[in-house]
Image (tube, rainbow, N blue to C red):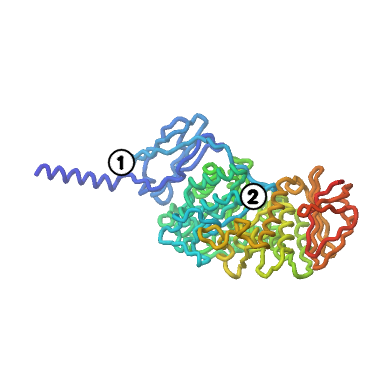
């Protein structure tokens, strides 16, 4: 009887202790580093009633500045200061709630890898990849959480992954790009699969259908070893509706509009429009992209720090070289300025490109750092030049005479609005726009003019995967068909366009043309670092030059459907005392101090000399 009573008492103690035991479910980020320029960092701790705990840290060089309690007792935000005395090791974080005590050993690591974080600039060319649609290097990770691969559906998961990207690094290097840009790779554990990556459900974890955090770090290192850079697509405006915190938010203001769905009006100009109503601005900034993408409130100080720190964690962990920030203008201005500044303070050479999606370049320029258009410094190094993209998609029509080159000239003539027009992202298309290549094209005139323009124009060029093999897709067909599988990226594909033998003659001609320009561009300082001079188009002829010290490149574009003879004496500001120009593609020599005849819908890229 006494033994049974004792057993009951022990069981009661065990059960009561289990009910009240400190239970930590999440700690983010999983580690931090010594030697960071900013000595303070935040740790999010999530667990049942963890906010009621008394927290003590006793570690040389590390002090707990604040244990910030929030509305939800299941969260506490720790703000730690790491001074120069701190050594790598495990920081014992002691949690006490009445009789219950628990010590969590938090990893403080040394900054051992100094490679990467190089940034990107006009000497680079970015190659944009939608990872799910590029190459499947590891079929065994295809299916997860009742979401299976279905390549017949344009909106389903197709199985591309990081291993597939890794296997094509040599292909990309051979093509001549310098920088790999991946659409979001973080976890998207959403119904339907969210193949595009823009509904993140865990900001600190790579989606396991793409691979692991370690595989992404290895991919970045492999790219660096081959002389390539890595850009990571990030989304700080919203998360996925299946994000782990959505069922138990830290506070009512964690999600905009108090967590209730409100469709954004997409009024992107409202934030800079001096006539815009405050109501319209509020709906734009606080509205959600969709019910599946809750809008994050960056004015919440703990969330703002969490998001900024997440970016810095990925840079330090994977040593990425740049970030492309999605839905840039939809976020709080002050948050974005702080985010940029803190990232650049930690990594001065780093670069961030913001998705500044506007029809007019004035609006994109408003966001660039040191802009005189904005009352406060936005601190963004690289906005996206959508204005030039929209014009370029019509400018090189190969079937008719047109005046669209005049539109290009006039748009670029507005570059005075940019604090740094050489540090904007230029592109012919991307994962959200109709592809530059058109199904009805039977020749490469339009393609060659567009590529020649993109790779010699001011700015940082971006090429969308598959452009080099004439991949097509229209917005009307749906976003899924803008992001088609790269033929040859999957075992069993009928054709393999990663190889010369798998491409048609026309596709090889396009690939070879792009490769020649990309490889040449790496070696030409006038194009990558030079200033630009251009002339107003006449008779459908647009002429511009790129000049750096003793190197000059002259570009001539003919938009007419007939060949034209161009008198060169008009372009003395570029030509100067040079007498000849060697065409980059054909190696043919032209006398630039005389007239030059350019083919219909043709282009010349001439390196000037006196030979």
Residue at 45% in and 45% down: 28
Q: Quadrant of the N terminus?
A: top left
Residue bearing the label numbered 1:
100
Task: Give the foreground label among 1 and 2.
Answer: 2
583 vs 452, nearest the viewer = 583
Q: In the rendered image, is residue 237 in sight?
A: no
Q: In the rendered image, is residue 393 in sight?
A: yes
Is the residue marked by circle 2 packed among few (<14), some (14-19), or many (20+) residues within 10 Å?
few
499 vs 54, nearest the viewer = 499
Q: Hey, which residue is sitting farthest left in the picture?
A: 1
Residue 411 placement: quadrant: bottom right
Is the residue marked by circle 1 packed among few (<14), some (14-19), or many (20+) residues within 10 Å?
few
Residue 494 percent location from the top left of the image: 55, 63
449 vs 10, nearest the viewer = 449
Residue 423 is labelled as: none
Residue 174 is labelled as: 2
Total labels drawn: 2
Q: Earlier in the sequence, mark 1 or mark 2?
A: 1
Residue 228 percent location from the top left of the image: 61, 46
Q: CA distance from mark 1 to mark 2?
A: 60 Å
Task: Determine whether the residue tagged by mark 1 lies in a helix, strand or loop.
Answer: strand
Residue 425 percent location from the top left of the image: 67, 53
Image height of 553 relative to 277, above or below: above
Residue at 15% in and 42% down: 6
Give yes or no for contact between labels 1 and 2 (Cβ–Cβ under 8 Å): no
Task: Determine whether the residue tagged by mark 2 lies in a helix, strand or loop.
Answer: helix
Residue 227 percent location from the top left of the image: 62, 43
Q: Is residue 413 left or right of residue 460?
A: right
């Amino acid at each position: 009887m006494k033994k049974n009573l004792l057993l009951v008492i022990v069981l009661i103690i065990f059960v009561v202790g289990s009910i009240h035991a400190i239970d930590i479910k999440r700690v983010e980020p999983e580690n931090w580093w010594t030697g960071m320029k900013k000595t303070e960092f935040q740790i999010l701790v999530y667990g049942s009633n963890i906010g009621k705990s008394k927290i003590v840290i006793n570690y040389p060089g590390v002090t707990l500045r604040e244990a910030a309690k929030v509305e939800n007792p299941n969260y506490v935000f720790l703000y730690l200061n790491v001074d120069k005395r701190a050594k790598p090791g495990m920081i014992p974080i002691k949690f006490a709630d009445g009789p219950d005590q628990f010590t969590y050993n938090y990893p403080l690591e040394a900054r051992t890898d100094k490679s990467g974080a190089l940034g990107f600039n006009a000497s680079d060319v970015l190659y944009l990849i939608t990872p799910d649609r590029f190459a499947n290097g590891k079929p065994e990770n295809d299916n997860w959480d009742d979401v299976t691969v279905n390549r017949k559906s344009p909106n389903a998961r197709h199985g591309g992954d990081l291993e597939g990207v890794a296997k094509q690094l040599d292909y990309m290097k051979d093509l001549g790009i310098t920088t790999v840009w991946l659409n979001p790779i973080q976890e998207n554990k959403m119904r339907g699969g969210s193949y595009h990556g823009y509904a993140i459900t865990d900001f600190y974890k790579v989606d396991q259908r793409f691979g692991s955090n370690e595989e992404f770090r290895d991919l970045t290192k492999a790219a660096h070893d081959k002389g390539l850079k890595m850009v990571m697509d990030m989304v700080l405006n919203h998360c996925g509706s299946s994000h782990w915190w959505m069922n138990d938010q830290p506070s009512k203001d964690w999600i905009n509009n108090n967590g209730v769905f409100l469709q954004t009006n997409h009024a992107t100009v409202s934030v800079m429009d001096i006539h815009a109503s405050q109501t319209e601005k509020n709906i734009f900034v606080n509205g959600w992209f969709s019910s599946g993408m809750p809008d994050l409130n960056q004015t919440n100080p703990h969330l703002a720090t969490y998001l900024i720190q997440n970016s810095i964690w990925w840079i330090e962990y994977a040593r990425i070289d740049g970030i492309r920030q999605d839905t840039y203008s939809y976020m709080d201005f002050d948050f974005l300025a702080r985010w940029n500044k803190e990232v650049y303070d930690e990594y001065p050479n780093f670069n961030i490109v913001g998705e500044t999606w506007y029809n007019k370049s004035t609006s994109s320029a408003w966001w660039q750092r040191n802009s005189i258009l904005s009352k406060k410094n936005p601190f963004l190094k690289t906005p996206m030049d959508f204005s030039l993209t929209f014009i370029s998609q019509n400018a090189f029509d190969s079937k008719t005479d047109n005046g669209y080159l005049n539109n290009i000239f006039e748009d670029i003539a507005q570059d005075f609005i940019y604090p740094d027009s050489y540090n904007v992202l230029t592109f012919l298309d991307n994962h959200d726009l109709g592809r530059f290549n058109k199904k009805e094209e039977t020749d490469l005139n339009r393609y060659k003019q567009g590529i020649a323009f993109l790779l010699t124009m001011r700015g940082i060029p971006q090429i969308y995967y598959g452009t080099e093999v004439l991949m097509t897709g229209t917005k009307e067909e749906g976003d899924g068909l803008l992001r088609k599988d790269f033929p040859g990226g999957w075992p069993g594909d009928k054709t393999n366009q990663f190889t010369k033998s798998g491409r048609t003659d026309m596709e090889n001609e396009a690939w070879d043309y792009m490769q020649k320009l990309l490889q040449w561009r790496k070696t030409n300082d006038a194009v990558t670092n030079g200033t630009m001079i251009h002339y107003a188009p006449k008779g459908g002829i647009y002429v511009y030059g790129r000049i750096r010290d003793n190197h000059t490149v002259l570009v001539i574009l003919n938009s007419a459907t007939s060949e034209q003879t161009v008198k060169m004496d008009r372009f003395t500001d570029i030509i100067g005392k040079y007498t000849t120009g060697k065409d980059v593609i054909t190696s043919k020599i032209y006398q630039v101090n005389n007239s030059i005849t350019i083919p219909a819908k043709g282009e010349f890229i001439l390196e000037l000399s006196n030979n």
